[in-house]
Image: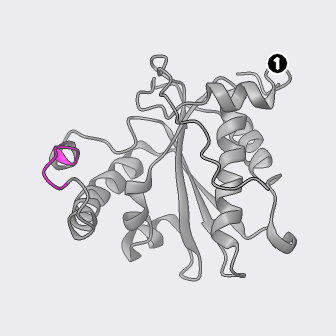
Amino acid sequence: MTTSMAGMSVVDAIYSRRSVRSYTPQRIDESTIRTLLAAAVQAPTAVHEEPWVFVVVQDSATLKRISDHAKPLFIEEAHRAHIDSGGHALDHFVSPDFNIFYDAGTLVVICGRPMGPFVVADCWLAAENLMLAAEALGLGTCVIGSAVPALNAGEIRAELGIPQELSVIAPIIVGMPRVQTPATTRREPEVIAWK
């Protein structure tokens, strides 16, 4: 796997990046993961706090345990928030075979230190850098928001060594896409003022 990103412009990476939900079993090597993390920490950061820290999970048994723990927690939260009222979007979360990580072999969890009001924004900027760098390397990514409650739960935090003072902000799966994900349409930018 190449670590050269020179062949794709940032604009190309922005327009070609997709949320990938089907991965090959090919494992991402440590060098490539370190390249992605190095790109992540180049993100803008309020008053140069750099509040992000990372957890990398590649053990398949651990990924399955997190997925199994996350599914009922996410369903519970979705019901409380009235997500999927009347639809079937949550149906796959009750299936024992459903893997919230879509069989990706790598999960990168971006956590934030409690350093100020911009920690969440800073961590999401790092997440976007990581995803665009992955796209430039021919890798797929997807933010797995449904994993956040489980990753912030005591049992999983302890297993992954995430200290209590950190907040899990952005869980991102990374891997080799099994198929090409088609583009989705976007609305034109809605400008409500231009003076």
Q: Is residue 115 above or below residue 101?
A: below
Q: Dividing the picture into quarters, in which one does residue 2 lie?
A: top right
Residue range highlighted in magenta: 85-91
Q: Residue 140 in the image: x percent, y percent?
A: 56, 30
Question: What amino acid is at disc 1?
Answer: Gly
Q: Residue 52 in the image: x percent, y percent?
A: 70, 65
**Residue at (46% x, 70% y) in the render:** 157
Which quadrant holds the N terminus? top right
Q: Residue 142 in the image: x percent, y percent?
A: 50, 40
**Residue at (29% x, 60% y) in the render:** 74
State the residue in front, 86 or 4: 86
Disc 1 designates what residue?
Answer: 7
State the residue in front, 185 or 17: 185
Which quadrant holds the C terminus? bottom right
**Residue at (47% x, 28% y) in the render:** 184
Secondary structure, mark 1, is loop
Q: Is residue 159 magenta?
A: no
Q: Residue 124 in the image: x percent, y percent?
A: 64, 57
**In the image: residue 73, left or right of residue 15:** left
Q: Total label count?
A: 1
Q: Please identify the dominant SS of the magenta region.
A: loop
**Residue at (53% x, 67% y) in the render:** 168
Q: Residues within 10 Å of mark 1 (few under 14, many from 20)?
A: few
Q: Is residue 141 above or below residue 42?
A: above
The residue positioned farthest toward the front in the image shown = 195
Q: Does the magenta stretch include residue 88?
A: yes
Q: Dividing the picture into quarters, in which one does residue 121 lie?
A: bottom right
State the residue in front, 192 or 162: 192
Display coloring: one colour
**In the image: residue 104, left or right of residue 169:** left
